[in-house]
Image (tube, coloured by chain):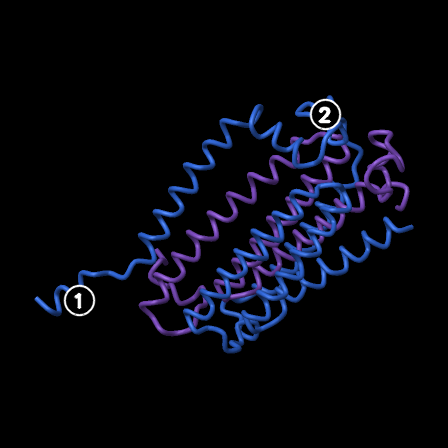
Chain colours: A blue, B purple
Amino acid sequence: MVDWIVFLAGTLIALSGAIGVVTLPNPVHAALSLVLTLFGVAVLFVAQAAHFLAIVQIIVYAGAVVVLFLFVIMLLGVDRTESDLATEPLRGQRPAAAVIGVAALGLLLALSQVHLTIGATSTAGAADGPGTNVEKIADSVFTRYVFAFEITSVLLVIAVVGAVLLARKPRLQSAELTG
Amino acid sequence: MRGILAQGAVLVGKGPKGPTSVGGGWFLAVAAVLFTIGIVGLLLRRNVLVMFMCIELMLNAVNLTFVTFARMLNDIGGQVVVFFIMVVAAAEVVVGLGIVVSIFRRRKIGATADSAVLLKG
């Protein structure tokens, strides 16, 4: 009974936030709705005993990614309400979006409910084995997936360099103006 | 319908012994709905930042699917994959927002996808 209450609460929070992201015209409100969705998904993570991921979800997504979104929204000054939902630049885009949405929903729901033939369970380690959730994830990350973990650091370095390069002000114009 | 949705517990024969008695099929259905909302939002909205948020919605739906399968198959590997997806998503947001800032610092009109018409071939 309690499990169902937790599941329904998390689902309600996540889906209402997602609908808010799509429908709210103001980007700031959409970003705050995104926080709602992230918290709802974190609740669903906790319900399935993924405690580490729930905390990372809140810290990284709700704490860092959404704040970055809000920073960019304020920086660009697009926080005023723009009627980007009212205009339809491509003819027939709305019906196409509706058709694709219904098709994707039907396909995904059918796929999620089909009886799958599955192979061996717990190949990377049992999720309900001994130890806490963090210990089990750490065991897997630093043994079986250690190479992917190291590649992740390379990816982050590349992302940081790319972001600095993209966000840097072009100094060429000011040099031309003064010189 | 309810019997099919509750099959996650039947699939691995765990039943109420697992972390939650709600079947994995229910969580997969929620992830499917979340992913679809992300798709529709990406197609409907013109604001680049809101389109980015819709991509985040889809990534979260996939994360939820991975965690659900990690529980259904009793495999910690699914949660490790979600960890990596979160790292990649953070890097993607940083680079994507950098591109958006560098495009829209030069033109002061609204940040819609139609403003970047120079990318049109």
Task: Find disc 2 in the rendering and name its residue.
Answer: A122
Q: Earlier in the sequence, mark 2 or mark 1?
A: 2
> Quick one: label 1, few (<14), some, or many (20+) residues within 10 Å?
few
Q: Chain of mark 1?
A: A
Measured as percent of width and height from the top left, residue B73 is found at: 75, 30
Q: Is residue A26 left or right of residue A179?
A: right
Q: Is residue B102 left or right of residue B8?
A: left
Measured as percent of width and height from the top left, residue A163 is found at: 37, 52
Q: Chain of mark 2?
A: A
What residue appears at the point 77 percent right and 60 percent down from the top-left corner?
A12
Measured as percent of width and height from the top left, residue B111 is found at: 44, 68
A85 or B51: nearer the viewer: B51
What residue appears at the point 67 percent right and 39 percent down from the top-left corner?
B66
Measured as percent of width and height from the top left, residue A62 is found at: 59, 57
Q: Secondary structure under badge 2? A: loop
Q: Quadrant of the C terminus of chain A?
A: bottom left
B68 or A87: nearer the viewer: B68
What residue appears at the point 58 percent right and 30 percent down from the top-left corner?
A141
Badge 2 and badge 1 both on one subunit = yes
A25 or A108: nearer the viewer: A25
What residue appears at the point 67 percent right and 58 percent down from the top-left corner?
A37
Instruction: Give the amino acid at mark 2.
Output: Ser
Most extreme residue toward the left, as rendered?
A179
Q: Quadrant of residue A178?
A: bottom left
- The total of numbered circles placed on residues is 2
Q: Find the distance from the CA under tag 2 to the CA under tag 1.
A: 60 Å
Q: Quadrant of residue B71?
A: top right
Task: Find disc 1 in the rendering and name its residue.
Answer: A174
Q: Is residue A174 left or right of residue A29?
A: left
Instruction: Give the amino acid at mark 1.
Output: Ser
Q: Secondary structure under badge 1? A: helix
